[in-house]
Image (cartoon, grey):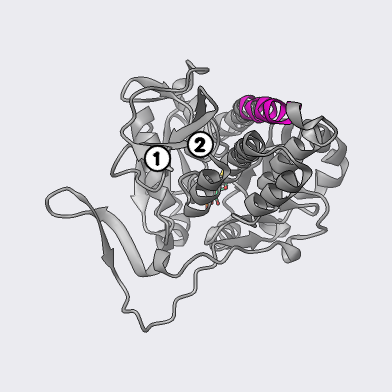
């Protein structure tokens, strides 16, 4: 897996979010059959890009979180399967690569959804045509993700505009957890899409950004918001409840990794505590969710597999040293046991609504929206 300074940009893309004046997606392709993306393990301290040329690169990259965020993991997995089929298009290779990619990040259902899309597309094709078809399918999934998130943004924007009425010109104050911005998708993001659109439309906004220990995805959110010029403030994860008690939060808006049929929302660890505090303080709690994040095979969130990440993510922290160079320091001695569950489940009773590309639904209305969402996925 090559990693290095970026010298170009996605050849099939000329829109989207800008980094130092250049438009980027989080993931793109370069000929011949190379998958490139922004290396999120290095942000916000270094801006570098990776180049995946094999399924092994994709498996390592997804596991180590070079790419992360449910929608992006799905698209990255699809490209990983396409890379494998370019090496070996047999049924055995297809099945083994599907299984290996699926195992990289077990919680976000978008990964299974995207891998199944590619597998189902190529399964009946002769081996000679599989690699091209898989690659085309992955490209289609990437493009569709951008359109999906733009639609989520438009529906979420209407919600922000409604809240703005009660703020009489003062900023609408949004608290978000983890990173559900454009880095977590191919472009736009889910929870941040309405914020980018609202800012562009001149809506006064201020975003409280949870740090999101231990992986600090909040730093990615802050990086995105700063680049886009959206007013924001970084806070420790534990500050959210206090701010809600003080009347400083108008809306909690997060992404999701899987939503069960009853509206239980699985998202980054710590989301549940924000939802509890929001409920206690009558602050609306919304999750912005593409249709591919719903798992209607699960009646509720109890059976969702919660990924257990390495303890080192908690025991060490990355930043810059006093000379300004990226560095990692250890916080915990090596004998102290560390647990690192990466996600939690917010019960549907705490969820005000789910912002999808097909509109906003309450958990109670999910059953009637199921056909619409399955058709959209
Ligand atoms: O472990 P991560 O960084 O992949 O977790 C990401 C999240 O929990 C996001 O909130 C979720 O995937 C929604 S992203 C649009």
Residue name at image x 38 percent, y 82 percent: 336
Residue 69 x/y as whole percent: 55, 45
> Is 352 left, or right, of 1 in this rendering?
right
* Residue 34 higher or lower than 110, as above or below: above
Q: How many marks?
A: 2
| Residue sitting farthest toward the top | 14
For the residue labelled by badge 1, is the local secondary structure a helix, a strand or a loop?
A: strand
Residue at x 17% of width, y 55% of height = 321
Q: Is residue 285 magenta?
A: no
Compared with 254, 120 (above or below) is: above
- The span picked out in magenta is 129-144
Q: Main secondary structure of the magenta part?
A: helix
Q: Is residue 48 above or below residue 297?
A: above
Residue 113: tell me if it is visible. yes
Q: Are marks 2 and 1 in contact (CB under 8 Å)?
A: yes
Residue bearing mark 2: 53
Q: Which residue is mark 1?
A: 2
Image quadrant occupied by the C terminus: top right
Which quadrant of the figure has residue 124?
top right
Residue 153 at x, y percent in the picture? 59, 29
C-alpha distance separating marks 2 and 1: 9 Å
Q: Earlier in the sequence, mark 2 or mark 1?
A: 1
Percent coordinates x, y for residue 162 in the rendering: 59, 31
Quarter of the image holding residue 5? Answer: top left
Q: Please tell me which residue lies in front, 56 or 76.
A: 56
Quadrant in which residue 130 is drawn: top right
Name the outermost residue toward the bottom: 335
């Amino acid at each position: 897996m090559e990693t290095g300074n970026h010298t170009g940009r996605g050849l099939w893309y000329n829109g989207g979010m800008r980094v130092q004046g250049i438009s980027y997606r989080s993931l793109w392709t370069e000929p011949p059959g190379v998958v490139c993306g922004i290396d999120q393990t290095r942000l916000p301290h270094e801006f570098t890009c990776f180049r995946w040329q094999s399924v092994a690169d994709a498996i390592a990259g997804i596991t180590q979180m070079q790419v992360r965020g449910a929608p992006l993991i799905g698209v990255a997995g699809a490209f990983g399967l396409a890379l494998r089929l370019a090496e070996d298009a047999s049924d055995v290779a297809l099945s083994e690569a599907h299984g290996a990619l699926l195992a990289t990040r077990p919680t976000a259902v978008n990964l299974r959804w995207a891998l199944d899309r590619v597998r189902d597309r190529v399964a009946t094709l002769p081996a000679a045509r599989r690699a091209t078809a898989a690659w085309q399918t992955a490209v289609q999934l990437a493009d569709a993700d951008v359109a999906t998130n733009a639609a989520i943004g438009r529906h979420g924007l209407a919600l922000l505009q409604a809240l703005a009425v009660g703020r009489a010109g003062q900023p609408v104050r949004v608290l978000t957890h983890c990173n559900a911005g454009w880095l977590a998708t191919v472009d736009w993001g889910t929870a941040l899409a309405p914020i980018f659109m609202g800012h562009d439309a001149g809506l006064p906004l201020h975003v409280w950004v949870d740090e999101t220990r231990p992986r600090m995805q909040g730093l990615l959110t802050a990086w995105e918001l700063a680049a886009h010029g959206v007013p924001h403030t970084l806070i420790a994860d534990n500050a959210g409840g206090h701010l809600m008690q003080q009347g400083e939060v108008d809306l909690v808006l997060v992404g999701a990794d899987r939503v069960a049929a009853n509206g239980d929302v699985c998202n980054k660890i710590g989301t549940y505590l924000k939802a509890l505090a929001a409920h206690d303080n009558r602050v609306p709690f919304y999750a912005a969710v593409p249709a591919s994040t719903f798992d209607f095979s699960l009646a509720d969130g109890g059976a969702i597999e919660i990924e257990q990440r390495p303890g080192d993510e908690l025991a060490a922290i990355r930043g810059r040293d006093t000379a300004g160079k990226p560095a990692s320091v250890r916080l915990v001695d090596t004998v102290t046991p560390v647990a690192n569950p990466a996600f939690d489940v917010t019960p549907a009773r705490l969820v005000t609504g789910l912002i999808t590309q097909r509109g906003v639904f309450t958990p109670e209305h999910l059953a009637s929206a199921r056909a619409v969402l399955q058709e959209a996925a």
